[in-house]
Image (tube, grey):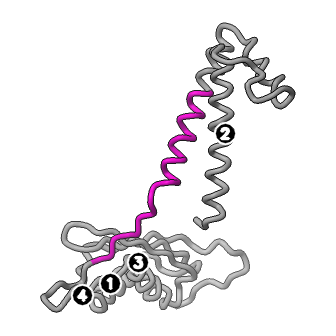
Amino acid sequence: MGIFNRVAVLIISLAILAGAVITLLVATELSTPDIIGSGWLESQLQRAADATGGSAAAIIAVCVIVALGMIALLVFELSPYRKPVPLLISSSEKGIATIDKESVCVLAEAIAASSQYVRYVECSVKERTGGLLVTCRASVALGCNVPELSAELQSNIKQSVEQMTGLPVVQVDVKTKYESVEGKRLALR
C-alpha cells in the first residue's frame, strides 16, 4: 500500500477511534455531551447520553467493537512491513543463492502462457515439505481439452521451475475455467 494510502487509513482510523471512545464516555455517563465543544456533534452525543436500557447497552457494545476494530487496524498498519522470505537455492562457503517467490510465479506464468490455449494465467508458490507447491489459475480457450492441457501445464511448469531454479517441485495444481468472452472462436486441434 502506498504511503499516502497508509496515512489516510491511519487518520481515518484515529478519527473513528476517537468518535467511538467519546460516544462510549458519553453513553456510560463518564462525560457530558459537550465534551468536544458546543454545537459540533452535540445533538448526536445527547442522544447517546439520553439512551436507557437496551439502547444504551447497544450503543456501548457497538462503541467497544468499533474501538477494538480500529485499534487492531492501527496495530496492523503501524507494524513494520515484512518482506517475503526468499527461497534458498544453494548455500556454500562462497555464499548463498536465493530467488523471490514472485520470480518463481513469473516463471510459472510464462511457461503456462506459452500454451496456445491459455488466455490468462495467475500462479502462486508456497514452500512445502520436500519442495514447492505451485498453484495456477488459468483461463483457457473454449473447446480445448482441459485434462490434456492441465497435464501438459503441470509437466511443463514442474520441469521448467526445477530446471531453471534448482528447486524441487512437489506438486503443481492447475485450476482452469473456460474463457467467458462471447464471440471468441473455439479452440481447434
Residue carrying label 2? 16
Q: x, y (%) of residue 25?
A: 64, 21
**Mark 3 or 2 closer to N-term?**
2
Q: Secondary structure at mark 3?
A: helix
The amino acid type, in three-letter code, at marker 2 is Ile
Mark 4 or 2, closer to the camera: 2
Q: Classify 6 as above or below 166.
A: above
* Mark 4 or mark 2, earlier in chain: 2
Assess whether residue 64 is covered by the magenta stretch.
yes
Q: Can you give x and y, in whole percent of width and height, for residue 64 in the image?
A: 57, 27
Q: Please give the label number shown on residue 150.
A: 3
Nearest the viewer among 49 and 91 is 49
Q: Which residues are magenta?
A: 63-87
Residue 1 position in % (x across, y down): 58, 65
Q: CA distance from mark 4 to mark 3?
A: 23 Å
> In the displayed structure, does residue 137 sit left or right of residue 55?
left
Residue 121 magenta? no
Give the residue at x 36% y 84%.
157
| Disc sitting over residue 166 in the figure | 4
Magenta-colored segment: predominant secondary structure: helix
Q: Are marks 3 and 1 in contact (CB under 8 Å)?
A: no
